[in-house]
Amino acid sequence: MKQVVQNYKSGELAVLDVPVPGCKPGGVLVRSAYSLISTGTELMKVSEAGMSMLGKARSRPDQVAKVMQSVATNGVPATYRKVMGKLDSYTPLGYSLCGVVEQVGAGIDEVKVGDLVACAGNEHALHAELNWVPKNLYVPVPDGLAPRHAAFGTVGSIAMQGVRQGGPQLGEVALVIGLGLIGQLVVQLLAASGVRVVGVDPDPVRCELAGRLGAAACGDPASAAVEAAVAELTGGLGVDQVYLAAGGGSNQPVELAARLCRDRGRVVDIGKCRLDLPWNAYYEKELDVRFSRSYGPGRYDPEYELQGRDYPIGYVRWTERRNLACFLDLLARGSVDVEPLISHVADFDDAVETYRRLKDGDLKAVAVLFRYPRPEGEAAKAAAPAVAVPAVKVRRSPARAANASVRLAFVGAGNYATSMLLPHLAQRDGVELSTVVTTTALSAANAQRKFGFAEATTDLDAVLGDTSIDAVFVVTRHSSHAELTRRALLAGKAVFVEKPLALTEEELAGVLAAVEESGNDRLQVGFNRRFAPLLREARTRFGARTGPAHLRYLVNAGRLDHTSWYLQQGTEGSRFAGEGGHFIDTASWLLDADPVSVYAVASPGDEDLQVVLRYPDGSTAAISYVTSGPAGFPKETLDLVADGKALRLDDFVRATVYDRKRWVSSRLPKARDKGQNAELAAFVRAVRTGGPMPVPLESLVATTAATLAVRTGLAGGAPVALERAR
């Protein structure tokens, strides 16, 4: 098997072929799926290895003391040989991973071969294809939690143990100094505990990230903004606790902690930073300085870690194994989100180059994962889930322009058609409502009477065969959209289909086959939000961007009446399958790209969803689709942050753009305008003139594929790649 190693004397990093470890009693043999690089601890070790011998000595005075003791006991020659022998040996790297149990040792009965486990330990959870892990250093991964997220278990436990040492209570205010990997996790754990958090880091990107993950305020340690935020949140009294998650040789963190902590506050050291405590400052406030030792009780105890002797829960509630299990549970329930922390995923074979890029600063990252190859023969079975984004292949037929007026037919006349579409079209000049088709005669007659259709019928074939009709609107139940769209395209009509375009990949392929066969790509899906005047104005004011953007979209969908056909998932698909394309399309339009991957998690019953989209330039969009929110809360709120600017949309009633110099708020509209009127105007104009459709077909297909990928992701519990056909 292969393993990442380092020679501490020369600094050399290598991926070596080494023997497979034996599966000893009291543990399991685990095949790695993902392992996490600690961009703090590991990079410090890698950097130290590249120093001169004098530099190594200065960086590790504790080891120098041991050497001097050995000299006194064993003499210089023996000590020299011992030290050089140890330095000139390969040492392992890594301590946090997720993998699959490949073999179970004697005495183990709570996991079996094939189970997914998260593993800890700098001797047992190494960057290696296979690891033997003792009982108290692994835990089963909860159902639905992605392996790449479970690989954060160890560092999550370190952050959790630090928070436990701080003893946070509801309503308190905490200061987190250092917003690297551990600091970002501490921020989320504190926020989940009901604590308001102020983050401190000189990197504005990390400050922005912590803000998105729950910090009330963040800033540079040298800026007045941090002290102002603490004063505002605490009424000038100071924070209740400070978490030192920074590294380096500066004494600034402990000095800042003393300045901003309240009287008799708590200071917890999690990272490895300089700790020259200013005596007066700490004495006068009687600050309680605490240390957090790694993953929790049990760490460094060979009887606990190697022999599997647990501590009674009545005496030690949170051991390192119970911390590990607790953190995974928080991940699985969505209380902590590690996906935004993942800056890069590298193939394990590229480990040496990845470390080099991190050390040289070419790769700036909060968290980096190694992805391991599957054993030969398992690759197909264990391949990462993917959804194909079909290529649009069409020899376009010339689009005919309509005559003086555009003649429209409606297939379906339900609530949405009669409340959101037809009122706009009935009043529009140059539009003739020709025929309405429904499955029941009375509903067709009602639509004819209300909106002035020339004809009402239940005969779809007659409408599709009528050459005088320019465009067909498909506004029926979701399960019929793809087939009706396919038939209308083959009949040569321009088609406006309400979302969704398709409920399965097969249905989407059928629509595109009709486009290819007919040469007719005159298709629009009812993704109206990108046409909303308020959002378009805000996007214009936000302007172009140069760096990746981060978008957060909360959809308070609310509960449906139990009689609603939307709940007939067996035939009509899930609620998100029906309307999720709205929100994905809006995000993609704002980010000016199509997504490349989708990750989704859900509450029991799949009613509340969290969907994370990744885009080619590193941008992300997180869509929270919830049905459990209060009825009085706005239905849709959206935040977009990039390049030091922010855009906020409040339920299509108010849009605000902030930049470094000013903020601009649009006027309040008289009513929510979600873009239906503008979308219909653009569609009618395209049909009348023969010009391009309002949204490129490639974009409609990409959004539909991304919506379908949510279902695939929920079933597989892992990110789903959107693979574009060529």
Image: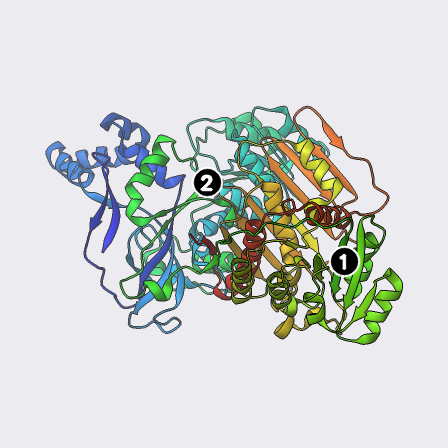
Q: Amino acid under label 1? A: Pro
Q: Is residue 362 above or below residue 336?
A: above
User: Closer to the camera, 613 or 114?
Assistant: 613
Please say whether residue 171 is visible from this viewpoint: no
Name the residue: 38% across, 32% down: 362
Q: What secondary structure is found at the residue carrying circle 1?
A: loop
- Indicate whether 680 appears above or below 289: below
- Residue at 36% from the left image edge and 72% from the top image edge: 112
Residue 461 placement (x, y as % from top left): 68, 71
> Which mark is first along the chain, 2 or 1?
2
Q: Is residue 334 above or below residue 202?
A: below
Residue tagged 1: 630
Is 605 positioned to the left or the right of 532 in the image?
Answer: left
Vertical side of 260 occupied by 531: above or below? below
Q: Quadrant of the N terminus?
A: bottom left
Q: Label 1 crowding class (10 Å Cα cut-off): few <14, some 14-19, many 20+?
A: few
Residue 344 position in % (x across, y down):
42, 44
